[in-house]
Amino acid sequence: MRKHGLLFVICGPSGSGKSTLAKRLLSHSLLKTKLARPISYTTRAQRRREVDGKDYFFISPDEFRKILRENKILEHTQNFGYDYGTPRQYIEQALKKRKNLLLCLDIKGAESLINLFGKERVVSIFINPPSLEVAKVRIIRRAPKTEIKEIKRRMNLASYELKEAHRFDYQLVNDNLTETVSKIKEIILCHMSR
Ligand code: ADP
Ligand code: 5GP
C-alpha cells in the first residue's frame, strides 16, 4: 500500500472549467470514495449557485487575516484583490490518513504544494480553455454581474497562466466537458494504481 496520499492539483485560467471539472470528478462513481477536496477560504463575493462551506468558505478580509495569524492556512494567494487560502488542518489530517486530495489552485498554490510535499506526491494538471475568448464568454455567463474591471484582471492573469502551462505534468483543453472529465479520471486512476 502507498505510504502517502497524492495531491492532484488542477490549475488553469478563470473560465477554463476547473470548478466544474472538480465537481464532476468528485461525484464520479470510480473516484468519489478515493478523493477528497479541501474547501478553501476566500474573501471574494459568493456567486449565485455557489454554496458557502461547499464551494468555498466565504469570509471577510478581517477573518482571513485572523486565521492566517492563527496559522490555520497552509498556503495562500491573492488574485484580483481577493484572498484565497487552503485549510491546513484538513490537508494534514487527510494526508495522515493516506487520503488522495483534489485541489483547484492558482499556479502559486501548485508551486507551494510541490515545495511543501515534494514533486513525487503532487500531480499537476493544467486546464486550457478552447481559447481566451471562450473563457471570457464562460466567465460572463457564469456571473453576468461581474465588473468589467474584474473580467479584465481575470483575462490578464489568464494570459500569464497560459504561458506557464508547459510546467505542468499534464495539459488538457476543456472543450467537451465529458471528454475532459474522462481524461482527468484516467490520469488520476493511473497515478493511484502506481
Ligand atoms: P473555473 O473554475 O476554471 O473558473 P468554471 O468551472 O466556473 O471555471 O466554469 C466557468 C463556466 O463555464 C461555468 O458556467 C461552467 O458551467 C462552464 N463550463 C465549464 N466547462 C465547460 C465546457 N467544457 N463547455 C462549456 N461550458 C463549460
Ligand atoms: P475564483 O475566484 O475563480 O474561484 O478563483 C480564482 C483563482 O484562485 C483560481 O485560479 C482558483 O483555482 C484559485 N484558488 C482558489 N482557492 C485557492 C487557494 O486556496 N489557494 C490558491 N493558491 N489558489 C486558490
Image (cartoon, rainbow, N blue to C red):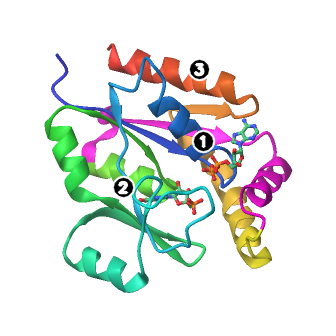
Report the residue at 75% width, 78% height from top.
149
Badge 3, how many Cα within 10 Å: few under 14, some, many 20+?
Answer: some
What residue does disc 2 label? 112
Residues 110 and 181: in front is 181
Badge 1, how many Cα within 10 Å: few under 14, some, many 20+?
Answer: few
Amino acid identity at mark 3: Ser
In the rendered view of the protein, which quadrant contains the N terminus?
top left
Instruction: Mark 3 or mark 2: name the one nearer the start of the chain.
Output: 2
Residues 73 and 27: in front is 27
What residue does disc 1 label? 20
Tell me if the residue at label 1 has its CB under 8 Å from ligand 1: yes
Report the residue at 76% width, 71% height from top.
145
Report the residue at 78% width, 65% height from top.
144
Tell me if the residue at label 2 has its CB under 8 Å from ligand 2: yes
Amino acid identity at mark 2: Ser
Check if residue 129 falls in the magenta segment.
Answer: yes
The alpha-carbon separation of the residues under discs 2 and 1 comes to 23 Å
Q: Which residues are magenta?
A: 117-144
Residue 81, quarter of the rendered image? bottom right
Say if 56 sits above or below 70 in the image. Answer: above
What residue does disc 3 label? 182
Residue 80, quarter of the rendered image? bottom right
Mark in front: 3 vs 1: 1
In the rendered view of the protein, which quadrant contains the C terminus?
top left
Amino acid identity at mark 1: Thr
Residue 32's disc is none
Residue 21 point in image, percent of width and height: 58, 37
- Element type at mark 2: helix
